[in-house]
């Protein structure tokens, strides 16, 4: 199951385990059960602290349970935790074996204070980029508190449960049998949902922070680059973001990042975070900026109620997927309307779906989905496709992809619980059409995350932050970088470069102003 190179690496990681870890497997006659069994026995030989047993009484099969005889904790994997979830398995083994988690002291205190019995079930797909973050956050809680159990469930393998619970998006989290959340969720998000007073405690602590020299708003490639450049200048630097990594965390294959032939979004995000942590940067996540103002220092007010003060600010808030804004889209979001084909595509295996948008992302999504679903209909608003010719040729070569141009989607149709189709208008003839399908993947570009800046700094009619060649905005001391700005090309490597430019611009601003020279001698 595991090759020798991986076994050697794992053996090194597992050398830090100090407590016994029990691997409990529940098997049936399926091929996947044999894979789980092989995986468990491969792991068994990699640490003297591992024990193995079988338990036929477990209802879900195949299942691999990671249990601590010492602390009574339990983390379960229903299916074969490979692909993107392999890291989740390894971390579960380490944390169950006594290796410290990356949770902060405050988070550990809050987790250990949870008194209720909490049974989490997380439905995932092994191709989902977002799912491991949710699984690992929940597993961290389960590893620290025996009142909490977590079960990762491969939706593609347990289709009966997926259908019964009408799950059309991953990750979908259930708590004690009731829907808890869908989509990205961090450890702090979960704690805040479980502990009513957590958000207030965090806001109070944030408001007590000393002023920064440079505060970066946004944790994507532009923000990470800006923070590193600022910290290297000896400036007191902070990053505040809803999550570290931004949109890149949801990106699958990256093949145009110069000097790296191929990587994946979550891997790049992890490397960016580790690089930032090499410097004295205060990383503040799970916080959303809501206003920007200037009264001496630049003030950034957060949704939590906290306010951060800084001598200069770099806005690197990035962008998000553009929505169709048609009737039914919001009603059926997560119930057939999706924005990540890599994450949710496996849930539509053998079904008919549509992709909205004929650019590179739309045609790539159609090609990807064509290997999973019965049929893909691509709807493009314009009379020509904007995708690269090589992608168009590939799509046209596949027998289960149909491309319709001059198609304006007008409504998402459903039965109250899930998508059943969509309506569109032929922009040439004016004729109305309906398509029966199970899923709709929206791929129509990006919109900058700048709504909170309206009235504070100059924006274009499209919501982009207007900057000069040093990244300066219309507000003195405020700079901007990345996809949220007027930078013409939205690429990871360009965002990183613009982050460095904005940081150097902010440094130049600080050394030229008396109130910003204290730490820049």
Image (spheres, rainbow, N blue to C red):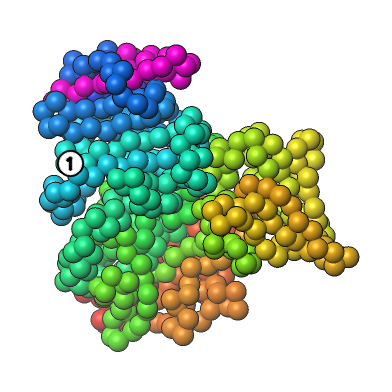
Question: In this orientation, which residue lies closer to the viewer: 218 or 328?
Answer: 328
Q: Residues within 10 Å of mark 1 (few under 14, many from 20)?
A: some
Residue located 44% across and 39% down the image: 124
Question: In the rendered image, which quarter is residue 49 located in?
Answer: top left
Residue 221, image x, y percentages: 44, 55
Question: In this orientation, which residue lies closer to the viewer: 261 or 103?
Answer: 103
What is the quadrant of the C terminus in the image?
bottom left
Q: Which residue is mark 1?
A: 147
Magenta highlight range: 15-43
Residue located 43% across and 51% down the image: 183
What is the quadrant of the N terminus in the image?
top left
Helix or strand or loop: what does disc 1 sit on?
loop
Residue 323 seen by the camera = yes
Magenta residue check for 373: no
Residue 255 seen by the camera = no
Left or right, 254 with reference to 231: right
Residue 330, image x, y percentages: 54, 63
Residue 519, image x, y percentages: 22, 70
Residue located 21% across and 62% down the image: 196
Q: How many labels, in total? A: 1
Question: In this orientation, which residue lies closer to the viewer: 369 or 488?
Answer: 369
Left or right, 263 with reference to 195: right
């Amino acid at each position: 199951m595991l090759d020798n190179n991986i076994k050697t690496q794992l053996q090194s990681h597992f050398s830090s385990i100090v407590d016994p870890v029990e691997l409990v497997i529940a098997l049936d006659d399926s091929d996947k059960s044999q894979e789980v069994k092989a995986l468990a026995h491969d792991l068994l030989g990699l640490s003297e602290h591992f024990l193995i047993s079988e338990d036929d009484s477990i209802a879900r099969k195949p299942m691999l349970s990671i249990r601590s005889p010492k602390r009574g904790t339990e983390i379960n994997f229903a299916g074969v935790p490979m692909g993107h979830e392999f890291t989740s398995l390894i971390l579960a083994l380490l944390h169950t074996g006594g290796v410290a988690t990356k949770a902060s002291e405050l988070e550990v205190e809050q987790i250990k204070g949870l008194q209720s019995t909490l049974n989490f079930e997380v439905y995932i797909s092994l191709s989902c980029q977002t799912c491991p973050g949710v699984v690992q956050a929940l597993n961290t809680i389960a590893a620290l508190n025996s009142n909490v159990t977590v079960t990762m469930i491969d939706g593609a393998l347990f289709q009966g449960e997926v259908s019964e619970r009408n799950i059309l998006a991953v990750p979908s989290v259930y708590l004690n049998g009731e829907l808890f959340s869908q989509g990205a969720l961090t450890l702090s998000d979960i704690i805040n949902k479980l502990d009513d007073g957590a958000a207030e405690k965090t806001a109070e602590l944030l408001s007590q922070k000393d002023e920064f020299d440079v505060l970066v708003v946004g944790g994507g490639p532009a923000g990470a680059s800006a923070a590193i450049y600022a910290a290297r200048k000896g400036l007191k630097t902070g990053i505040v973001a809803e999550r570290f990594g931004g949109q890149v965390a949801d990106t699958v294959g990256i093949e145009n990042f110069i000097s790296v032939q191929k990587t994946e979004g979550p891997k790049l995000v992890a490397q960016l975070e580790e690089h930032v942590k090499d410097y004295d940067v205060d990383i503040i996540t799970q916080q959303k900026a809501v206003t920007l103002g200037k009264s001496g220092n630049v003030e950034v007010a957060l949704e939590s109620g906290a306010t951060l003060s800084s001598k200069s600010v770099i806005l690197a808030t990035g962008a998000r997927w553009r929505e169709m804004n048609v009737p039914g889209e919001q009603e059926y979001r997560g119930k057939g309307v999706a924005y990540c084909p890599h994450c949710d595509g496996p849930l539509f295996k053998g079904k008919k779906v549509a992709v909205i948008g004929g650019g590179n992302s739309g045609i790539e999504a159609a090609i990807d989905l064509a290997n999973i679903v019965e049929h893909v209909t691509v709807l493009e608003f314009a009379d020509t496709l904007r995708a690269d010719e090589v992608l168009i040729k590939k799509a046209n070569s596949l027998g289960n992809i149909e491309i319709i141009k001059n198609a304006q989607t007008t409504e998402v149709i459903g039965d109250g619980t899930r998508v059943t189709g969509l309506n569109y208008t032929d922009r040439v003839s004016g004729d109305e059409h309906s398509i029966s399908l199970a899923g709709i993947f929206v791929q129509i570009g990006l919109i900058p995350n700048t709504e909170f800046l309206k009235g504070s700094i100059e924006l274009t009619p499209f919501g982009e932050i207007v900057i000069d060649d040093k990244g300066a905005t219309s507000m003195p001391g405020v700079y901007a970088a990345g996809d949220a700005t007027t930078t013409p090309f939205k690429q990871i490597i360009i965002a990183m470069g613009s982050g460095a430019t904005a940081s150097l611009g902010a440094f130049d601003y600080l050394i030229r102003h008396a109130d910003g020279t204290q730490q820049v001698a």
